Image (cartoon, rainbow, N blue to C red):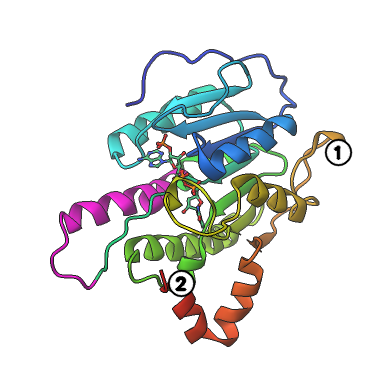
Amino acid sequence: MVTESKPKGQNITSADTPTAVITGGSRGIGAAFIRRLREKGYRIIVLSRSKGTCPEDDARVLWIPVDLSNGEDLSKAVKCLITETTRIDLLIFNAGVQEQFDFMEQEVHQRQQRIERELAINLTSVLVMTAELMPLVRQSASPAIIYLVSGTGYVPKLRSMAYSVSKSAIGFLARAVHRAAPDVSVIELIPPVTRTGMNAGRPGELAKPAEVVDEFFYRCRKLIYSQTQKEVRYREGSYNRIWIGKMKAFNILRIFKPDTAFRIVNKA
Ligand SMILES: NC(=O)c1ccc[n+]([C@@H]2O[C@H](COP(=O)([O-])OP(=O)(O)OC[C@H]3O[C@@H](n4cnc5c(N)ncnc54)[C@H](OP(=O)(O)O)[C@@H]3O)[C@@H](O)[C@H]2O)c1
């Protein structure tokens, strides 16, 4: 899916402009991230299959089309990315999919293919890109990597086991990256159930993507670049796990009342 054509819009930024790379910025939480990153003055490189709501008229936003479930496509996208930037200040692993089927159910249509695809997007691509993009991340004076995790990475959701397993593994990866690259700030971001395509048709009042991202930036205000700060400031080498909205209470619940947390996650 990666095209050879050079997307428009490079070279309008200075060497001082911080560069963010985000997977899955075409909609949902990723699109909300892009809106805030633009306000903060970042140059943004987006990796997703569709362009979605990525702005057409902002030369600071570059979209690289890629299907992260496809290894060949992923390699091409990484190569393309490396030609587009010499430095990554903020790397956000946001793309994700969640399949819904009971993992103990015997009659599941294309079980293996579905599990493999989900793990390829949610986990394999993140492992590969973390390793391959690390040299660019290390070019930044104060680099940060954000991993989108989930409450179901801490409390298993039986109807989305591959998703749960992938998110649990991403949390583990985040802690490993913190050890392996102590000069890089690592942030594990745990949003509440949010009104995005991932929860299409789910009833009830859910968090909005913009609320998730706004709370995230507020909580990271000492860590994340802001145009008014004149320079990129991350707390060097820190590791932060940021539970958003209702997830703060969920975090306490899962430690002290694990059975209740399990029932909540698996009630729907
Ligand atoms: N929504 C929630 O309640 C919630 C809660 C906790 C954690 N999270 C996490 O937050 C992150 C964002 O979720 P969201 O709710 O914003 O999901 P979403 O609205 O469904 O968006 C998913 C994003 O991932 C991209 N994506 C999906 N498959 C892809 C593929 N094969 N290749 C490349 N990109 C792909 C999509 O872009 P294209 O379709 O254009 O490729 C889209 O931009 C995920 O990691 C999710 O696990 C979400």
Q: Earlier in the sequence, mark 2 or mark 1?
A: 1
SS majority, magenta: helix
Q: Secondary structure at mark 1?
A: helix
Q: Quadrant of the N terminus?
A: top left
Q: Is residue 54 left or right of residue 74?
A: right
Q: Is residue 184 visible?
A: no
Q: Nearer the viewer, residue 202 or 266?
A: 202
The spot of residue 104 in percent (x, y) is 22, 73
| Nearest-to-viewer mark from 2 and 1 | 2
Task: Name the residue nearer the viewer: 116 or 262.
Answer: 262
Give the spatial CA distance, label 2 vs label 1: 40 Å
Q: Secondary structure at mark 2?
A: helix
Q: Residue tagged by mark 2?
A: 265
Vertical side of 53 occupied by 141: above or below: below
Amino acid marked by disc 2: Val
- The answer to which image quadrant residue 197 occupies is top left
Type of amino acid under label 1: Gln
To which residue does mark 1 refer?
A: 229
What residue span does the magenta drawing correspond to? 104-129
Residue 191: numbered disc = none
Query: From the viewer's perspective, is 248 left or right of 167?
Result: right
Q: Are marks 2 and 1 in contact (CB under 8 Å)?
A: no
Q: Is residue 152 visible?
A: yes
Residue 168 magenta-highlighted: no
